[in-house]
Image: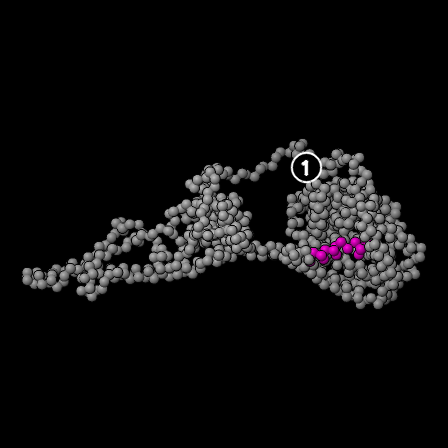
Amino acid sequence: MATEMVLSHRPGVPRGEVLSEAELEELAQRKPPTPAPSPGRCSASTAKSLLFRFLPVLRWLPRYPVKDWLLGDITSGFSVGIMHLPQGLAYALLAGLPPVTGLYSSFYPVFLYFFFGTSRHNSVGPFAVISVMIGSVTESLLPSEKFFISVNGSNTTIVDEVKRDAERVQLVATITILSGVFQVALGLLQFGFVVTYLSDPLVRGYTTAASVHVLISQLKNVFGVSVGEYSGPLSLFKTFIEICRKLPQTNVGTLVTAIIAMVAIFIVKELNHKFASKLPMPIPIELITIIISTGISYGVDLKSKFGISVVGDIPSGLKPPVVPKTTYFGQVVGNAFAIAIVGYAICISLGKIFALKHGYKVDSNQELIALGLSNFLGGFFQCFAISCSMSRSLVQESTGGNSQVAGVLSSLVILVTILKIGELFRDLPKAILAAIIIVNLKGMFKQFTDFRTLWKSNRVDLMIWIVTFVATLLLNLDIGLGASVAFALLTVIFRTQLPHYSLLGRVADTEVYKDVAEYQKAQEIPGVKIFRSSSTLYFANVEMYAEALKKKSGINVDRLIAKKKKVLRKLKKQQKKAEKEKAKRKKVTLLRTRMVKPRLPPSLQATEAECNGPGVAVIELSGEESSAPAEPTLRSLGLPQPDFHAVILDFSSLNFVDTVSIKIVKNIFRDFREIEVDVFVASCPASVLAQLERGNFFSSTITKQCFFPSVHDAVLHISGDSSHPALTTRGPRRGCSLVVCVPEVCFKRGVGVCE
C-alpha cells in the first residue's frame, strides 16, 4: 500500500511553489531583530499606573458595589474573625511562641493585605504548615534546654519561659522580616513564576508530610507529657519515640479534655459541611469550645487540681515595633527563603482556584509583593510568617465574602480581642488548642487519596509525591523541601532525556503525518524517513536523539560508513601501487627511447619486427582532457544501499538548541550524506532557526534550502526532485587512465586478458 501512495498537493499550490525556509524568508521579508525598548519618560500617567499596580485597593475600592457586597462581606468578616481567634492562638503554640503572637499575626498582616492583595477570597494569616516550619527553627536554635534555671539554689531546674519566649519572638521576627524581603524582591523582579518549580504533587506531598509533623508535635499536649525538643533529620521519629516511652506518664485529665474537644469539633464541622446550604454561617464550634473550656478551667481550676497545662498570661494591647536581631540573619536565611516560597505557593494556588471560579484575575507578582509587605511590616510587630488558610478561605467564600473588606472586618474582630478580650483566655487549656489543630488537619490528611489518582494518571507525579513525603518526614521540613525540589527537577531532566521517538507516515488524502506505530492508516512515504522527537534537543539528550534516528532508520549507519572507509582505503592503496608501477614503466620506457640503437642490416631488422609483433598502446588522459570525476558510490564499491534516499527531521517540538545539539545535528547531516541520504528539516520554529544561525550551523553544504515550513512541504520537495544524488550515476574519477588493450598480444606476452 505504501508503494502505491501518491502524494497530493495543496489546492491551488503547484509543485514548483514549494518553498524552503530560505525562499520563504525572502518572499515574506523577515524582519530584523527589534532592539529592546528604551524605558519611557516619567509622566503622570506612568506614575498613576504604577500606583494602581502596587496598590490594587485604589482600583477596586472606588467601584465597590455597596448594596450588593457589603452585607455578605460583613457576615463573612465576622465568621472568619471568629475562626482567626482560636487558630491564631493554636498556631502560635505550634510555632513555639507565646499565644498573643498568633493574635498579632491575625491582625497586622490581614489588615495590610487589604491594600496590596489581588485575591478577593484568600484569607491570609497563620497557617499550620508555616507555623510548624517556624517551630522547627525555634526548637533547633533556641531549645528550652538553653533556658534552664535552678530553683532556690537547689539542684532542681525549670525553664525560664519568659526569657525563652522573648528570645524566640526576636528570632521569629527576624525570620518573618527576611521572608518578607525575599517575597518583595522576587515580586519586583517579576519572579512570580518561581512557584512553578513547586508542582502540585510536590506541594500536596509536602503539606501532607508537614501535617504529620504537626500531628506528632501536638501529641505531647494531648497526652500531657513533656518531651525534649529535637531538630534536624529524623527529629520527627525521635519525638514520636520519646512520646511513646512516656505514655505511662499520661495526664488523664489532659487526655480526656483533648478527646472531648476533638470529638465535639469534628462532629460540628461535619454538620457544617453537610448543611452548608441551609446555614447562614458555619457554627463557630472552635470559638464555642474555647469559651466553654476556658470557663470550666477557670471555675474548676483545672491547672492546680488536675495538672492540666494552660495558656497563661495574654497581655492586652498592642506592642511598639521592635528592630530584629541582625545576628540571626546568617543562621536563618535558608529557612526564611523556604518559608517565603512555600507560603507564596499555597497562597497563589488557592487564589487562582477562587479567581477561576469567580471570573477575575490574580496577579502572581503582586501577590508576592502583598505577602512580602505583610510579612516584612508584621515582623516589626512580633508577628510570625503568614500564608493563606484553606479552611478560612472556604468560609470567607461560602458565607458571602466578595472582597478583602471581609478580611479587614475579620482583623478588626482580632483587634478588639487583643485590646479587651485576650487576657480572659489565660486559663484556656493547651489541650483544647491541640485539639483544634489536629481536627483542622483533616483536609490535609485527605491528600493521601492522591495515591489512587496519581497511580492511574501519572506514575512520575506519584513518585514525586512519595519522595517529597518521605524526604520531608526523614529530613525535616527545610532540608526535605530542598531535596524534593531537586528530585522534581531531576524527573524533568530524565523525561527530556528519554522522550518518545517516532517515525511518521502520511494519513491518506491529508497533509497530516502521524506515528506509524500508533496509527494504522499512517503510511510511510516510499524512500523517505520522517523522524520526530517529543522533546527539545540539548546537551543531555541530543546524542540519544542521533542514536534513535539511526536505529529507527533500519540501517546501521556507523557500520556502513566504516565499511565504506575501509573499502576506500583499500582502493587508495591499490591506486598508489598502480601509480608506482606506472611510474616504473614510464622510467624504463624513457631509458629505452634515449638509448642509441646500432643500425642492423635490413634482414635482421625484419626479423626483430616479426619477433616483437604489435605491442600495447597506452593512451594517458590528462586531467584537463578527462571529464569531471565523481565520488565512488556505495553500488560501485559493492556495499549495500539504504532503502531510502531522504530523511526529514521534524523540529516542531524544539524550543531551543545549544552548542552541543548544533554540533550533533551537523554530524547527522554529515553521516547520512556519507551513505548517500539527504537530510531535510521541517517545522523548525523561528527562534530555533535564529539560534542555529548564531551557532554557525549553516555552511556551503547545509543551507536553508534544506529547511521547510512543514513536513508536507519537505515531502513535496523530495517527491518532485528527480535529480536526487543517490539516484544518479557516477562518472569516472579525475586522472583515471584509459588503457586500450590488444588481447591477443597480451596473451602472447603472458600478461593475461585485460579486465
Residue sitting at x 41%, y 59%: 560
In the image, residue 11 above or below residue 680: above
Residue situated in front as seen by the camera: 591 or 388: 388
Q: Which residue is mark 1?
A: 50
Label 1 neighbour load within 10 Å: few <14, some 14-19, many 20+:
few
Question: Which span of residues is magenta-colored?
Answer: 436-451
- Residue 19 falls left or right of residue 172: left
Picture coordinates of residue 269 (x, y %)?
82, 52
Q: Secondary structure at mark 1?
A: helix
Residue sitting at x 80%, y 50%: 274
Q: Is residue 386 visible?
A: no
Quadrant assignment, res 468? bottom right
Residue sitting at x 71%, y 43%: 357
Q: How many marks?
A: 1
- Residue 283 falls left or right of residue 469: right
| Residue 100 magenta-highlighted | no
Q: Is residue 339 visible?
A: yes
The residue type indicated by label 1 comes to: Leu
Residue sitting at x 80%, y 44%: 399
Residue situated in front as seen by the camera: 747 or 306: 747
Picture coordinates of residue 479 (x, y %)?
68, 58
